[in-house]
Image (cartoon, rainbow, N blue to C red):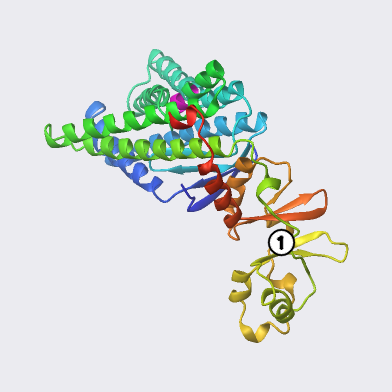
């Protein structure tokens, strides 16, 4: 789920929102301020109900953020990089770069999110009970009570043992620890997620069609999302299993053609692009150190009349934007980094020395070759 608006960083983790988060905010605002609160706490002005609904909706989003942030922080503690967190219509997503190295780390990363939601639910409940004991009544108590209930429900729902829910990841970690086979564990958790998604879709259709409840549509949407995400996770797990043990050095194109940073673009086109089969060229300084990456697409974006007066460094992406890997890195760990880069290439370095370049064509060939290998028992599960 891509972010539409970046909000900033918390604990070093980038936070963003997708436009679809407005849907859940609007539904909560209307449902609480025009439905639940007036029914349970009558006699207040409409603007007070609207304010209470807005506070509850914002606090709920912050609760979701705390849930995902817990995943991100624990993931980093176990050496898993985090691209960022995005809030959207169905909750939040912590985008992790790579996988946990062992079942114990996987279990901790998965379990901390529901734990935080449960703690928040109990905390809001305790504050609500203290407020009631102190004689507080009305909308403020209603907001606290609702936040307590919704966070506990969020924790319980996420503990359902079905990927991509946290409970599915906990199931994966437990099966991984029991059998020592991460791929088999991930496939089992994903299949459970697909079945759970189908169950929610069926329940939603029954509620919407036979009981006339509009809320059934939400069950259909959530079930469809869980089922689709579970299917994607199963495919990803099987791919990881087939590429297990494959290193970047096994797949990369070695000894790529490099170009000087101060080379005129017109000479890049005439002396390199038109005379070689390559479509991407690492850019280097006089000492051969990586200074960027230039591709055919970047050349095409430059007006032809500027090619004679511009240099390669003017159109190349900056060194910090070039995805990099070592020859000994696992291919499955590099793929997420490669997928996020617009140029779709990874420069392979041994220290400061450029030894190869990894392209989507290289990866596609590696996958095709992996498909030809005999599958293990878990690969055909």
Q: Secondary structure at mark 1?
A: loop
Please check the rendered image and state whether residue 135 is part of the magenta-colored stretch, yes or no.
no
Q: Residue at x 67, y 83 (%)?
A: 306
Can the viewer see residue 58?
no
Q: Say if 341 sits above or below 297 in the image.
A: above
**Circle 1 residue:** 318
Q: Residue at x 62, y 77 (%)?
A: 302
Rendering coords of residue 235 (x, y %)? 45, 39
Report whether 288 appears left or right of 300: right
- The front one of 137 and 186 is 186
Can the viewer see residue 203?
yes
Q: Residue furthest top?
A: 133
Rendering coords of residue 362 (x, y %)? 61, 54
Magenta part of the chain: 166-170
Report whether 239 appears left or right of 153: right
- The front one of 67 and 109 is 109
Q: Residue at x 71, y 72 (%)?
A: 314
Q: Residues within 10 Å of mark 1 (few under 14, many from 20)?
A: some
Report whether 53 appears left or right of 318: left
- The front one of 243 and 141 is 243
Classify residue 72 by image quadrant. top right
- The front one of 290 and 127 is 290
Q: Say if 57 sits above or below 102 in the image.
A: below
Q: How many marks?
A: 1
Classify residue 109 by image quadrant. top right
Q: Main secondary structure of the magenta part?
A: helix
Q: Residue at x 45, y 49 (%)?
A: 18
Q: Say if 17 sits above or below 229 in the image.
A: below
Rendering coords of residue 103 (x, y %)? 58, 22
């Amino acid at each position: 789920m891509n972010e539409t608006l970046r909000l900033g960083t918390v604990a070093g983790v980038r936070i963003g929102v997708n436009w679809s988060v407005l849907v859940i905010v609007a539904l909560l605002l209307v449902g609480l301020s025009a439905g639940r609160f007036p029914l349970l706490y009558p006699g207040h002005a409409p603007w007070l109900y609207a304010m209470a609904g807005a506070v509850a909706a914002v606090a709920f989003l912050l609760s979701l953020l705390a849930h995902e942030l817990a995943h991100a922080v624990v993931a980093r503690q176990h050496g898993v990089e985090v691209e960022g967190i995005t809030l959207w219509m169905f909750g939040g997503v912590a985008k992790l770069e790579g996988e946990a190295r062992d079942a114990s780390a996987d279990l901790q990363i998965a379990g901390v999110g529901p734990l935080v939601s449960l703690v928040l639910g109990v905390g809001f409940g305790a504050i609500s009970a203290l407020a009631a004991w102190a004689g507080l009544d009305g909308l403020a108590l209603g907001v606290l009570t609702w936040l307590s209930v919704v966070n506990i429900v969020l924790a319980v729902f996420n503990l359902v043992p079905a990927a991509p829910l946290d409970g599915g990841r906990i199931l994966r970690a437990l099966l991984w620890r029991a059998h020592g086979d991460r791929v088999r564990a991930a496939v089992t958790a994903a299949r459970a997620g697909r079945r759970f998604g189908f169950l929610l879709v069926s329940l939603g259709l029954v509620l919407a069609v036979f009981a006339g409840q509009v809320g059934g549509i939400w069950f259909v949407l959530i079930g469809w999302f869980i089922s689709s995400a579970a299917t994607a996770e199963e495919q990803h797990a099987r791919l990881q299993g087939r590429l297990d043990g494959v290193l970047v050095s096994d797949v990369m194109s070695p000894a790529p053609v490099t170009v000087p940073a101060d080379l005129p673009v017109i000479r890049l086109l005439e002396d390199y692009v038109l005379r070689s089969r390559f479509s991407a060229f690492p850019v280097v300084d006089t000492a051969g150190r990586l200074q960027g990456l230039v591709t055919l697409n970047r050349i095409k974006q430059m007006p032809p009349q500027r090619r004679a007066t511009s240099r390669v460094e003017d159109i190349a992406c900056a060194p910090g934007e070039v995805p990099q890997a070592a020859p000994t890195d696992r291919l499955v760990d590099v793929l997420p980094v490669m997928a996020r880069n617009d140029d779709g290439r990874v420069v392979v370095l041994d220290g400061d020395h450029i030894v190869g370049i990894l392209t989507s064509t290289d990866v596609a060939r590696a996958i095709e070759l992996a498909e030809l290998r005999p599958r293990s028992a878990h690969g055909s599960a």
